Image: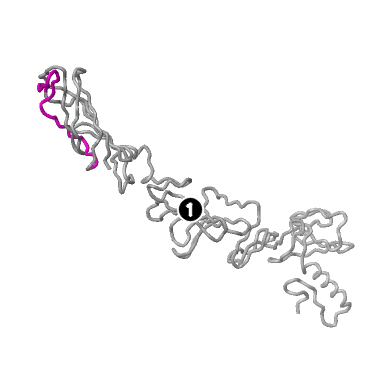
Amino acid sequence: MPNTTARLGLPVIAPSQAQKHVTHNEALQLLDTLAQLVLTGIGSETPPAVPAPGEIHALGPAPTGAWAGQGGQLAQWADPGWLFMAPQEGWRAWDAAGARLVACRGGDWIPVTPDFDNLDGVGVGTASDATNRLAVAAGASLFSHAGAGHQVKINKAGPGETGALLYQSGWTGHAELGLAGDNDFHLKVSADGSTWTEALVVDAMSGHVGGAAVQADATDTTAGRLARADYAYGPGNLVGSASQSGGTPTGAVIERGSNANGDYARFADGTQICWVYQFALDPCDDSSGSVFWSGTNTAWTFPAEFLAGTKPVVSGTCDNPARWLTAGVPGNTFVGFKAFAASSFAATTYANAMAIGRWF
């Protein structure tokens, strides 16, 4: 039978051994050292001047004094001297100075790192639970890069599930940001944690934005809402083709055009202005007393039609101050003019004319 145990090297009492207590006490001393092993120092080189009873050091490679020649050994103070023993691979000890668990590996004492995979929960400054497997109570949480960028990922099982960030106050939810019940991106808010408003929803397919914070239609002027490009106006659609549906503008604010009959401006509120320069009239060769006029009305076809059944307001001036114009009853597509003068004038008279009315 061996004289020592296989693992801890404890001395064994031999059959018919005299003074068995010596062997027994030596084994107890070794057990006192190795069981619940606590190291006062790791890598120690110089013995303390006044060691405490049972004090244990893991010695460095070149210790001095009473430890000389015992590099790498465990040294325990057992008054009046030091006891030495060789640590074995895998022995564990508590590092009192570093407040950590260490293990003997390859002759060095290495901090024991627990396996953090597949943990039931982790609580930092607070307790985790079955729902909140990771719980952190702190003033801030930092997620930094490891040499490049950094992503925080929230993954859900399927389109109908929720993957979101919930913002609470006093444990009551007031805002939620993420994929809430589908794959569109949602921003929801709540005053009481019970009734929620979809403030913004970004369609996953088109990227278009909707929700209560966005203008609902062309007539929606609710304060605080975001204007939609197809309902609001800016440099890109202020001038263009004016259109409407049921009296609500559906096109540009101002439409400007011209053709052989003159120029026109059409406004989103229904107003329309038409005008023409150098409009030719018949000569002033008919007379009655001292007044001469054009023999027939000369029709001016408007460059843009006015609303059917309406009569625009028409005015005009001649290019010669000695002549003047009168207009007939206008229709929605044209008006007739005559030129008048104080004396006969056979040459063609030119006029400028304007009509104001509505296009819807």
In the image, 73 versus 114, the foreground residue is 114
Measured as percent of width and height from the top left, residue 271 is found at 30, 38
> Per the image, is 17 magenta?
no
Q: Quadrant of residue 232?
A: top left
The three-letter amino acid code for the residue at tag 1 is Ala
- Residue 291 drawn above or below residue 97: above
* Label 1 secondary element: strand
Name the residue: 18% across, 33% down. 335
Question: At 55% across and 57% down in the image, what residue appears?
Answer: 166
- Residue 135 falls in image quadrant: bottom right
Q: What range of the chain is rendered magenta?
A: 283-307
Q: Is residue 112 above or below residue 146?
A: below
**Left/right of residue 201 with respect to residue 42 in the rendered view:** left
Is residue 161 left or right of 55 when viewed as pictured?
left
Q: Residues within 10 Å of mark 1 (few under 14, many from 20)?
A: some
**Residue 287 within the magenta-colored segment of the rendering:** yes
**Residue lying at 37% horizontally and 53% vertically, measured from the top left:** 206
Report whether 341 appears left or right of 69.
left
Specify the quadrant of the image occupied by residue 346.
Answer: top left
Residue 34 percent across, percent down from the top left? 77, 68
The answer to whether residue 77 is above or below residue 355 is below
On the rendered image, what quadrant is the N terminus found in?
bottom right
The residue shown at (19%, 18%) is 320
Toward the viewer: 86 or 301? Answer: 301
How many numbered markers are drawn? Answer: 1
> Could you say which is closer to the camera, residue 279 or residue 26?
279
- Which residue is labeled 1 in the image? 199
Q: In the visual, does 290 lie left or right of 145? A: left
Residue 81 percent across, percent down from the top left: 87, 62
Q: Residue furthest front?
A: 289
In the rendered image, the quadrant that contains the C terminus is top left
